[in-house]
Amino acid sequence: MRENAFRFVLKKIIEIIASLGVLAALTFFMLKALPGGPFDEDLALNPVVKEKLLEHWQVESSWSSQAFSYL
């Protein structure tokens, strides 16, 4: 009886982790599909400052590295 309960709890934990992973991946790719960037609205932003912000937040890096960092 205890073994069945342990398997049930372990199965549910694995399902929760998998669900959260899928949800995080869907959220990431949906946000990447939106047009624009995080600093597009700031028209008064100095180009040098904007470049430093993009570099700091790794906006210009590849999707795979951004997804890994996000997850």
Image (tube, rainbow, N blue to C red):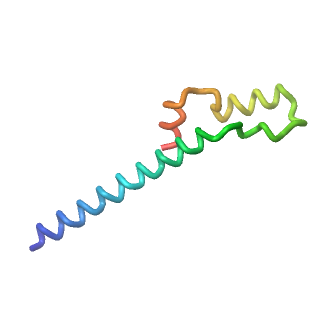
Give the residue drawn at x 38%, y 55%: 19
For this rendering, which residue is in front, 13 or 23?
Answer: 23
Give the residue drawn at x 66%, y 35%: 57
Give the residue drawn at x 48%, y 49%: 24
| Image position of 51 with respect to 34: above or below | above
Give the residue drawn at x 63%, y 31%: 58
Picture quadrant where residue 40 is located: top right
Please state the horizontal and vertical placement of residue 6, each as a whole percent of the image. 18, 66
Please state the horizontal and vertical placement of residue 33, each as a whole percent of the image. 59, 39
| Image position of 7 with respect to 43: above or below | below
Q: In the shown orientation, is residue 31 left or right of residue 53?
A: left
For this rendering, which residue is in front, 32 or 66?
Answer: 32
Please state the horizontal and vertical placement of residue 34, each as a whole percent of the image. 63, 41
Picture quadrant where residue 14 is located: bottom left
Query: For the image shown, how many numbered marks are present on the structure?
Result: 0
Q: In the shown orientation, is residue 15 left or right of residue 1?
A: right
Q: Residue furthest bottom?
A: 1
